[in-house]
Image (cartoon, helix red, strand yellow):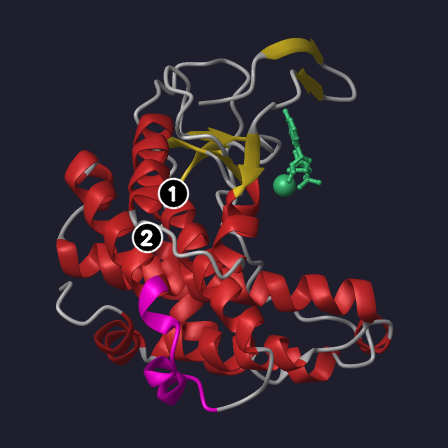
Amino acid sequence: MIPHLMDFRADPAVLITQALDGYAPLVRKLASHDALDPDVSVAAALALGRIHGQCLDIACLEDVPFPLPIGNPMTPEEYCGQAAEYPLFAARMPRVETALRNLAAEWRQTFFIHGDFKADNLHLNADPGKTGRPRIVVVDWELAGRGEPLWDVGSYVGSVLAIWIDRLGHDAGAFSLFEAAGASAFQRQIGHFLITYRHLMPEAAGNMDRFVLSSLRYAGIFFLHRVLAGLSTTGRVSASGSLMLHMAEALLIRTERAGAVLLPGLR
Ligand SMILES: Nc1ncnc2c1ncn2[C@@H]1O[C@H](COP(=O)(O)OP(=O)(O)O)[C@@H](O)[C@H]1O
Ligand SMILES: [Mg+2]
């Protein structure tokens, strides 16, 4: 489930792993127009359950902080030094601040988490005929540590939704789009992922309502990260970035409604 470890250097920290052979990034599979069985997301949930089931008793494990700093006002100089379209991002933040604070207040440090669990970091066995090897391999462990398991769950959900949004490639009202063709395959992936994970990890998931709502809020944070990454590389908020900002706000503060539209019948 993780690539074979070949070497480790402590300072600077480097992991050297064997190159994966016969695996393809899940993000590429989901973004292609191939019909994809939801058992892919079941395999992702099984992998995540195994990660969260690991023992925390490892001396070098560090605490993973809440994934978005809240309430650190910038100086005018710092604000002026941001990317050209940063104000589009900044304008949303006061609206989601209370939701972020509530989520941060529930952040646990009681599980081993991956910290960057998204479809880009999951590799799928490209040849299902080859048995005896894991269906999914997880890479990119640099953010792993002690933290909130629902952040990993929400990152995965956000990353699957982000593939769908990137595919739409234009700006529009977020939730009316879920009637658009193609959304249902992504909704199915997310539904299977959440149900499998909760079945495996009832202690980490907690009660169904809280599990679904907190996971969707963390998916909102995943979108905010994607917009910030776009700002730092291009200085702009792209068309799909502005849709992600809109969705992030909906997921963080109109979570019940977002859940009813995205995952009808799950709660
Ligand atoms: N063991 C591996 N075998 C093959 N490809 C890998 C392996 N580890 C990482 N990669 C590829 O390199 C990309 C970047 O590596 P990653 O560890 O995810 O670093 P980053 O922090 O830059 O995302 C991955 O998305 C994956 O496609
Ligand atoms: Mg990566």
- Image height of 132 relative to 249, above or below: above
Q: Residue at coordinates 16% horizontally, 61% vertically from top-left?
A: 209
Percent from the top left, x then y, of residue 259? 26, 72
Instruction: Residue at 32%, 49% (x, y): give it.
Output: 37
Query: Please, which residue is most extreme toward the top here?
Result: 6
Q: Which mark is residue 260?
A: none
How crowded is the residue under tag 2: few (<14 C-alpha within 10 Å), some, or many (20+)? few
Q: Residue at x 54, y 81 (%)?
A: 243
Segment colored magenta: 173-185
* Left or right: 13 as drawn, with respect to 173: right
Magenta includes 213? Answer: no
Quadrant the N terminus occupies: top left
Residue 106 — which label?
A: 2
* Quadrant containing ligand 1: top right
CB contact under 8 Å: marks 1 and 2 = yes
Percent position of residue 54, x then y: 35, 21
In the image, residue 142 lies at what x, y percent?
Answer: 62, 32
> Closest to the observer: 34 or 104?
34
Residue 152 at x, y percent in the picture: 42, 45
Magenta part, dominant SS: helix
In the picture provided, is 258 more to the left or to the right than 63?
left
216 relative to 83, above or below: above
Along the line of sight, the residue nearer the viewer: 93 or 242: 242
From the image, tell me which residue sits under label 1. Answer: 148
Residue at the location (32% across, 26% down)?
50
Tell whether position 177 is magenta: yes
Q: SS of the residue at dot 1?
A: loop
User: Mark 1, mark 2: which one is toward the viewer?
Assistant: 1
Give the position of the C terminus as an image quadrant: bottom left
For badge 2, the amino acid type reads Glu
Q: Say few, some or many: other residues with alpha carbon within 10 Å of mark 1 (under 14 / 14 to 19 / 20 or more).
A: many
